[in-house]
Image (tube, helix red, strand yellow):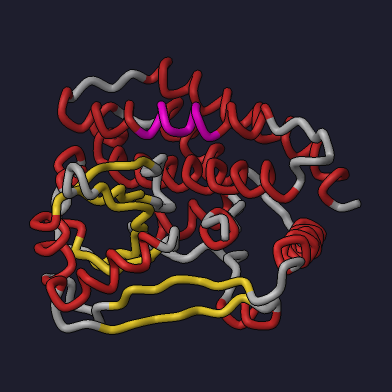
Amino acid sequence: MNIEFLYSQSFESSDQIYHDAIIDKESKYDFSNNIRMCDLELLNVNRNRETFNTFLDARDYIHSMLLKRKTLFIQVDEFYLPYSNQFEKFHTNHSNILLDYSIENEQYNYQIKDNVGLHFGEYSYSDQVLMMAFDNTTCLKHVTDYTINLQDAVEDLKLEFRKKTRDYFKGFNDNGLLYKKFLELLNNGTDQEIANELEQYGNAFGLISGSRSAFNSFLNIVYKDDNIDFESLAECFKTAYVLMVSLYRAIYTKQIQREQFHHHCMKIMDSELRFLNNSKNSLLM
C-alpha cells in the first residue's frame, strides 16, 4: 500500500495555519482533512499493530516483515536520530517509516515524513541508532503495518479519496491571512519586530510547504491518469520551503532580508492562487 494515502491528505488553508502557528504558537498539529483509521477500515484496509518492550524484542519481527516487503510504521524519539541535528534537537515522539533492511550493510532504509517543511527523505540507520530512538520514546512502542484485503481496494481507495477531496474543496475558503499578515509585518514592522516573529513565521511557512508538498504527492497518485497539471502547486511548496529556510537562517545571521522575504511570499501567493483557479474545478468533477 502506498504510504502517501496515509500521509498526504493535507491542504490546509493559510488562514488556519496563521491561527495555529502565529496566534496559538503551535509547532505541530493534525491537518483537518487527514484520513482516519475508521475510514480505512470501511475501505477494507486493516491495521496490524504489535507492541514491544524494547527494540531488541521487536528486531526479529521487524526483519521478518521487511523481508516480506512490508512497509512498517514505528514510534521513535526523534532526538536520537542523526537527521534532527539540522534542526533544534528536542525530545518528541513521532511515527516514522521503515522501508527495507540491508543485510549486507546491516542498516535500515528509513523514511522521514512530517507535516512541517519538506522533512521527506530517506536515510540509512543502524540497529544501534534505531534502538536508542525506539527504546526512549515515551509512548507505547508500536510496530504497525497495513494490509489491503481486496485486490480492487486500491481503486476503491482512490475513488473514496476523490470524493473526500471534492467534499473538502466544496467547503474550502482561504482569505490568505498568513500571507497578508506577513507582508504587513514586512512593510510596517521594524527590524526588531520582524526578528521577534521569525521563528513563528518560519514554522508557519514550513507548514505551508509540508501541506502543499504532501497534497501534491496525493494528487499525483489519485489523479495520475487524468492529465491534470499540478505544476503551480509544486512551485508553491518549493518556494515556501525556501522562505522557511531563509527565515530560520535570519534568526542566526541577524539579517532581515525584507525584499527577499517579500518576493518569496508574493510568489507563494501567486502559485497557490493559480493552483486553486486552474485545478479546483478539475478536483470537483
Residue located at (34% from left, 57% from top): 98
Residue located at (15% from left, 29% from top): 252
Answer with the quarter of the image where residue 39 lies.
Answer: bottom right
Q: Residue furthest right?
A: 285
Answer with the quarter of the image where residue 78 lies.
Answer: bottom left
**Residue 96, percent from left and from top:** 34, 59
Residue 193 vs residue 233, the one in the foreground: 233
Q: Is residue 18 left or right of residue 96?
A: right
Secondary structure mainly formed by the magenta segment: helix
Residue located at (81% from left, 41% from top): 225
Residue located at (49% from left, 23% from top): 264
Answer with the quarter of the image where residue 61 lies.
Answer: bottom left
Rendered position, 229 above or below 34: above
**Residue 14, percent from left and from top:** 57, 48
Q: Could one spot residue 26 in this view of the protein?
A: no
Q: Could one spot residue 199 in this view of the protein?
A: yes
Residue 242 magenta: yes
**Residue 11, percent from left and from top:** 61, 52
Q: Is residue 89 left or right of residue 109?
A: left
Q: Is residue 221 left or right of residue 281?
A: left
Residue 239 magenta: yes
Q: Which residues are magenta?
A: 237-244
Q: Is residue 99 left or right of residue 256?
A: right
Q: Quadrant of the N terminus?
A: bottom right
Rendered position, 249 above or below 16: above
Residue 52 vs residue 70, the one in the foreground: 70
Residue 143 vs residue 272, the one in the foreground: 143
Residue 66 vs residue 78, the one in the foreground: 66
Q: So how many labels did they put on this image?
A: 0
**Residue 278, percent from left and from top:** 81, 34
